[in-house]
Structures are given as structure tokens and as C-alpha cells.
Image (tube, rainbow, N blue to C red):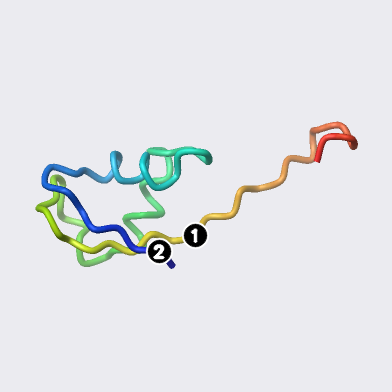
Amino acid sequence: MRSYRTIQGDTWDLIAFRMYPDIGGERLLHELIGANPNWTDTVIFPAGAVLNVPEIEIPKSNTLPPWVD
């Protein structure tokens, strides 16, 4: 599991956007919140908070043609 050290003013959606830019960004903030139960009541982070950033696998789509993999 990776970690992220917050910058003053960070929010859950902004952190998720930074950590998961290629797989959904801010739509994955629930995964980030779930990995950090001590911070669930925080809306705007202070500088220096260390958060756990879970690895999220990108699901393979089975709707692509066989030559695209």
C-alpha cells in the first residue's frame, strides 16, 4: 500500500484525483476513505497528514475485440 502526505487544503476528492488519474480519479474517493478510518470526519486536510492509498486493480473489459488486449 502506498501513502500520501497531505498538503494544506487537500480534500478527499482532490487526493483521489491525484492518486488515481488513470482509473477514475475522484470517483474512487470511497476507496481512499475506507483505507483511512481515522480521517473519515475530515473534509479539508491540514498539511502533513499521512494517508494510506490502496492499490486498485483496473478491471479488464471483456467487450473489447480479441486483438485489443
How many numbered discs?
A: 2
Kind of residue at badge 2: Arg
| Residue shown at the point (40%, 64%) measured from the top left | 2
Task: Give the side of residue 2 with respect to residue 48, left or right.
Answer: right
Give the answer, above or below, for where 13 lies relative to 55. Answer: above
Say which quarter of the image contains residue 69. top right
Task: Give the side of residue 28 with respect to residue 8, left or right.
Answer: right
The crowd level at tag 1 (other Cα within 10 Å; few <14, some 14-19, many 20+) is few
- State which quarter of the image contains the N terminus: bottom left
Residue 48: where, in percent of width, then height?
14, 59
Q: Kindly identify which residue carries mark 2.
A: 2
| Residue shown at the point (30%, 45%) measured from the top left | 15
In this orientation, which residue lies closer to the viewer: 36 or 17? 17
What is the secondary structure assignment of the residue under circle 2? strand
Q: Which mark is residue 55?
A: 1
Task: Give the side of residue 36 with respect to residue 45, left or right.
Answer: right
| Residue shown at the point (11%, 54%) measured from the top left | 47
Q: Which mark is residue 13?
A: none
What is the secondary structure assignment of the residue under circle 1? loop
Kind of residue at badge 1: Glu
Give the answer, above or below, for where 36 lies relative to 69. Answer: below
Q: CA distance from mark 2 to mark 1?
A: 7 Å
Marks 2 & 1, CB-CB < 8 Å contact? yes
Residue 66: where, in percent of width, then height?
90, 37
